Amino acid sequence: MARSLNKVMLLGNLGADPEVRSTSNGSRVATLSLATSRQWNNAAGERQEKTEWHRIVAWNNKGGGMADFAERYLKKGDKIYVEGSIEYRTWEDREGKTRYSTEINARELIALSSRSDGGGGDRAGAAVPSGKAESFNDFPEALDGEDDDLPF
């Protein structure tokens, strides 16, 4: 049996506030612009950096409201983790030109920024699509520095 895998994991910063819209059938979808960067030293020892921009698409679907979450809690500059699959689309625009798009179809979205939202809460670690946003504040034992059960 042939197997395949289409999985993308990204950690970066939002380049703009999420754009949320409703489709004709009433579904909501958020489009996010995510920047990831890598740094290295060139042969002369000079610091170099390259930034890649990713188009993230997050739908409200069964069990999760990623578009609503993005609209309510995410802002330009926030650090987020996205997990999903890569998708390539082709279509013709109004002038008949063929257009291409590469998108990440999000399955999981986690806010990593720790500044307060409008409601005054801390949203670091808030994740979707679990239905309930959780944070490390909900599980203080997860931050304990020592774990004697580790086998190494």
Image: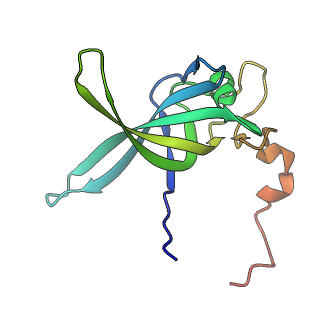
Q: Position of residue 93 (x, y in %)?
A: 30, 20
Q: Position of residue 63 (x, y in %)?
A: 77, 40
Q: How many marks?
A: 0
* 13 on left or right of 142: left
Which residue does the image show at 75% across and 79% down from the upper left?
A: 150
Q: Quadrant of residue 101?
A: top left
Which residue does the image show at 58% across and 20% down from the upper left?
A: 23
Which residue does the image show at 33% across and 30% down from the upper left?
A: 91
Q: Nearer the viewer, residue 123 or 81?
A: 81
Image quadrant in which the C terminus is located: bottom right
Q: Position of residue 106 (x, y in %)?
A: 57, 42
Q: Is residue 7 above or below residue 3?
A: above
* 96 on left or right of 68: left
Q: Quadrant of residue 144?
A: bottom right
Q: Nearer the viewer, residue 142 or 51?
A: 51
Q: Position of residue 17 (x, y in %)?
A: 53, 22
Q: Is residue 95 above or below residue 55?
A: above
* 36 on left or right of 81: left
Q: Quadrant of residue 115?
A: top right
Give the colouring mode of the picture: rainbow
Residue furthest to the bottom in view is 151
Q: Nearer the viewer, residue 87 or 96?
A: 96
